Amino acid sequence: MPTHDELPEIRAAEREKQGSYRHSIRVCMAAGCLSQHEGTIRKALVDAVAAEGLEGEVQVKGVGCMGLCAQGPLVMVDDSILYEKVTAEDAVDIVKALDKKPVKRIQSSLNIPFFQRQVKIVLENSGIVDPESIEDYISRDGYAALSKALGEMMPGDVVDEIMNSGLRGRGGGGYLTGLKWSTVSKAISDIKYVICNADEGDPGAFMDRSVLESDPHRILEGMTIAGYAVGAQKGYIYVRAEYPLAIDRLKTAIKQAKRLNLLGDNILGTEFDFDIELRLGAGAFVCGEETALMASIEGRRGSPRPRPPYPADHGLWGQPTLINNVETFANVAPIIRNGGQWFASIGTENSKGTKVFALAGQVKNTGLIEVPMGVTLREIVQEIGGGTTNDAGLKAIQTGGPSGGCIPVEFIDTPVDYDSLRMLGSMMGSGGLIVIDDTASMVELALYFMEFCMTESCGKCIPCRVGTAQMHNLLNRIVRGEARAEDLELLEQLCDLTRNTSLCGLGQSAPTPVLSTLKYFRHEYLEKIAAPPAEEAAS
Amino acid sequence: MAVRSRIKTLKIDGRDVSAHEDETILQIAEENGIFIPTLCRIEGLSLIGACRLCLIEVKGWNRLVPACHTHAEEGMEVFTDTERLRNYRRMIIELLFSEGNHVCAVCVSNGNCELQYLAQRLGMDHVRFPNMQPVRKVDMTHERFVLDRNRCVLCARCIRVCDEIEGAHTWDMRGRGIDARVITDLDIPWGDSETCTSCGKCVNVCPVGAIVEKGRAVGEMTKRKDFLVYLSKMREAKK
């Protein structure tokens, strides 16, 4: 049962153990790479190390996402050599090349903007720690923030620190995290809850998945600190069932944290009790909406309800509830460790810190990146992303998933922050960033997102249930070249209706892909509108 | 201990009105004879805010809010009948008509239908959207009642009355979005339901001709809704 004093001992022991190796070989065991090698690379490396008789000198470690998913499976040697598209057959060569020249044939460059332009806070451990080892996490200052919060800070101080950091919710809305914490902490109730929203569902987005698979303890630590700050005793992680690896690693992490008394009763020997349970989503996108998510945790149909009352006041089982997204919680430990001021020094005036993006679409370096707020879309796409695949012309950048919009290439020098993206008719969203080249049809893109919203609508309110279906129908007619000018007008009216009258964020934002493509690429719609029949045109 | 409720004064459509702080705009409007259309709401059942017909504008608020879910605040200025709201409401009714099979001329509830009433009252004279012609099942298996999902508007009144008043929870919703539909028990034929008490409350709260009594001809189905207010008041009094 470690107390505050014993945590540093575990840390020191683990550091000594890791420092005793001459070399460290890290194999990506996150979903992207793992799906290609199923752990065979790690096994082959372990065997190769054994064959060379280097067991005591070379550490082979499974780690989380290193970011450059497009070139996976990735293997990193001693922070200095990165191997790409590795197969199990390469293992012997990799081990033999230790202390010698790296294996040229699979060597990837670390000296590229993809790695150099990133600033890692959320992903600082990703690709470095073994997500299945709590000791490894502790060795990287893991749970130091929790120890500091419980040992040196009052709950109010923790809330203040988060407030000072200027952290805004990373799930899409961008609400001030400190304000949310403060509201829940002020709610008067014996029972409060903390919920981590890990129901990531935007097409092309895998930020939360990666964080959970690569550094699960970071989320547990953030949630536990939140529980202490707002006065909650119980936390839930609502994670989609489609993320089996993340679920496994979270389960392991919870077990380990309980073993070391970092979760459960009397955490670190204090009076503070906090427990975390997993709840698996059943595949509905709308369950990412906070009221639907809570209904789902309660075992009811996952459909949203009107707000207010907000969860901070009337949440899970009617109790005050704090809901934050995975990435938001991932920022908590570093903020507590380094102070709110430190965090606030990164980013722009109204958007602090960094943002993790899942780069997808027609871009060379698809993968996971973390950049400071305020970098331009050009830096993200052209430098970090390496430009479009096949060097096709860049046409637009889609952010915010099905709730977001398309930003045309002329705005590529826009800084990425909550307000700039909103000004352009898109949104930060949870971090999906899809690069669109000039071969894509924007009308078809809008149709795709509308189909997504239509099938994911819960069906409770009429504008979203029928509105999305009718918009989908109209977009289909436009794509097929069967639509008339009045159909476009009707489409715009439906967009207006659905945006302004829907019950929850899903419906309210469902028209955004259409509206933003209409705003910037209207000509593509007009080109597809059929000319009126001759006799009508004549009359 | 005496129950204390503060009084608020506010303006609805330019009229000065007073209200208890726990009253909704919808209740206040009704007390003052101001019409706000509703469909999912029925007095005596919980509120779900789903139909979006009662949306109102409040001066200084940038969003429309449902009158059924919005409480009175001192000095607020509410508008219930603006051009914008009228357009939205008409369009919502149009969407309902395009979604199902709402042909009044052949419906048992013709003349006694809340959807029909709203369409007339809100001036919906045509539907601009193509009918979606859904394939929806009719359930005739119950001894006395019929469920015609083609006429269902998914207001969930049947689900709520069965759960909240009758306590049977026979009804529920299945599927998502445009495929959502009401079901009995775990989607078994109504006649096979072991939880249904055949009380008929769902029939009487259904605003349209979706849940009706058997053996009615066109226009013959009338519904009695007073029982619900009575039952819920008695229930409250007992508590």
Image (tube, grey):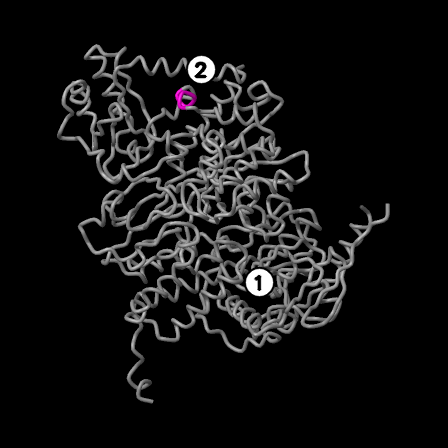
| Label 2 environment density (alpha carbons within 10 Å; few <14, some 14–19, many ≥20) | some
**Is A229 located above or below residue A6 in the figure?**
below
Residue on which the image places disc 1: B64
Q: Would residue A303 appear left or right of A24 to someone viewing this image?
A: right
Residue on which the image places disc 2: A10
Q: Quadrant of residue B227?
A: bottom right
**Residue B26: which disc?**
none
Which amino acid does the dot numbered 2 rest on?
Ile
Which amino acid does the dot numbered 1 rest on?
Leu
| Label 1 environment density (alpha carbons within 10 Å; few <14, some 14–19, many ≥20) | some
> In front here: B38 or A193?
A193
Q: Quadrant of residue B45?
A: bottom right
Q: Would residue A392 appear left or right of B98 to someone viewing this image?
A: left
User: Looking at the rendering, in which quadrant would you find the C terminus of chain A?
Assistant: bottom left
Residue B159 is situated, as x and y percent measured from the top left of the image, at: 62, 52
Q: Which residues are magenta?
A: A136-140
Query: What secondary structure predominates along the stretch shown in magenta?
Result: helix
Nearer the observer: mark 2 or 1; the answer is: 2
Residue A142 is situated, as x and y percent measured from the top left of the image, at: 44, 24
**Pointers 2 and 1 within a single chain:** no
For the question of whether residue B213 can be seen, the reply is yes
Residue A154 is situated, as x and y percent measured from the top left of the image, at: 60, 29
**Is B120 located above or below residue A440 in the figure?**
below
